[in-house]
Amino acid sequence: MRAPLTVLISIFALAVLGLTVVPGIEVDGEARRMSFFHAFYFISYTATTIGFGEVPVEFSEAQRMWVTVCIYLSVIGWAYAIGSLFALMQDSAFQDALRTERFAREVRQLGEPFYLVCGYGESGRLVTRALDHLGIRVVAIERDPVKAAELDLHGLRADVPCLVGDAAKPQLVRLAGLEKPECQGVMALTNSDETNLAIAIAARLLAPAVPALCRTGSVEIEANMASFGTRHIINPFEKFGEYLALALHAPSAYHLLEWLTGIDGTEVRRHRDPPRGTWVLCGYGNFGRLLTGALESEQITVVLIDRDAPPDGARHRWVQGDGTCAPALRQAGIDKACGIVACTGSDVDNLSICVTARELNPDLFIVIRQNHFSNNALFEAFESDARVVPSRIIAHECLAILITPLLVPFLDEVKAAREDWAASLLERLTGRFGWHVPHVWSVRVDAREAPALSALVRLPKSDVTIDALLRDHAQRDRPLDCDVLYVHRDDGSRLLLPGPDYAIRAGDELLLVGDRLARSHLALTLENPNTLDYVLTGRDLPGGWIWQQLARRAG
């Protein structure tokens, strides 16, 4: 806008100067000239509104001629300036600057805890929806303007400030509030491992106290992230490899893990356990290599089908092809195999592989990779034994770490436990809560999350057991529909599946499983001293100070 302003100022200056120089009408034989003040005043209302009035006296012919020239010049100048203004308002760079400033203002005004989500793809969308459902604020950075615009279409409860840009640039993550004290964590969930690595580095250097959760599909990038202290690295392919290996040697532990980490309220159907024998794997990329390693760790024979020979081909039998046609599958021995994994980067190819393989061997255990959530209807219609959806694996891991951090060490204990122990626990929990995914949450016994209980257990000789605490606040003889799975004590020690007689201590962090109603009832018990006293002793104390005084006098 410098050029239009310069043109307007020049026209005004020239017009004013001309009016002071051009001679006016003659008075007593002498031509009168206009002063700078009157010239500026006249041009101000003439050039802006095309209003006209000859002041302070009637103009001479020369002055009228000059005013005519000034009127046309001012019209041209204003047309040029207004046209330039409209062009500037439509300029993409200018609009980006306005959006960036609006985003920065929204982040500055955000005074409640929030999480920074970098990448609003399928994983970012699932995480954002889950956090929004829990009443937790989110700030997003997304490179694709189309994906960023989808935020307004998803009907979220709270506004999500979203910046369109490359999250690999440190200035953008700083603008998004990485260094604000309200930032509770940053999630690098873009489709680019290099971008996620840059976000991890920025978080480590700019805000080392903020936990970072980073997605990657590369073992090399994962090692790089770990080298500078990234706290949580999520490789969905490696995670599923661990799950499949767990399902092979401890099926009940796998079903328990699947039940506890699913989407709250959905039903988990117990499918058949993966068999032992020869497996055919189609697509030897990053996922294929990790899955092959997981199968080999369980002494499973793997036959590879890929267009290119694997670099470690001497270790595996290799069949050239893509697996979408029957000849390659027959050559790999699909009729004698017990399982097949379709893990290419194409959803269409993966479905084609599995449909063909099932026709050749209906008893196959089928593991299929789903790359895009938009194809969900096709994969649900196929009904495979196990479906690998990287975006869901990433979202579940992020939510488990952020919302219920105690769930991660508990699941580690489950993975390391004996199969009979896991089977017994799974039967007990599903027998009580059913196969619908339960609500899992954690509570810390401190003044912030459990003020009433924290104050009570700090008193001498005031033991509170789990059995006594998990009671209905309206009818104490009825237990709450929840259970304690894990306790992390303030001294760092841990207790798996504490018994009903466990005495809760101040500073304990409890991992609970149950339903949402039980959580809300327990929250009231933990916060209200009178409710807690009723749950523990059965005494129904008056709530207000006046009623308490009257109760004491009556007693």
Image: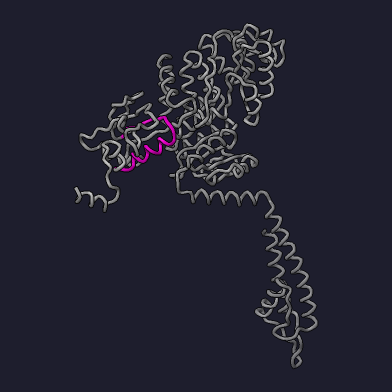
Residue 404 in the image: above or below residue 44: above
Color theme of the render: one colour
Which quadrant holds residue 326?
top right
- Horizontally, is 436 left or right of 27 in the view? left
Which quadrant holds residue 195?
top right
Q: Nearer the viewer, residue 333 or 86?
A: 333
- Horizontally, is 284 left or right of 268 in the view? right
Please state the total of marks drawn on the protein image.
Answer: 0
Residue 411 in the image: above or below residue 280: below
Measuring from the top left, give residue 53's x and y in whole percent.
73, 81
Q: Nearer the viewer, residue 345 or 479?
A: 479
Q: Nearer the viewer, residue 353 or 27?
A: 353
Question: Is 442 included in the stretch rendered in magenta?
Answer: no
Residue 485 in the image: above or below residue 184: above
Residue 237 in the image: above or below residue 59: above
Q: Which portion, as a residue range, is magenta?
A: 507-529
Question: Is 508 included in the stretch rendered in magenta?
Answer: yes
Q: Nearer the viewer, residue 420 or 347?
A: 420
- Residue occupying the point 80% across, 78% down: 65
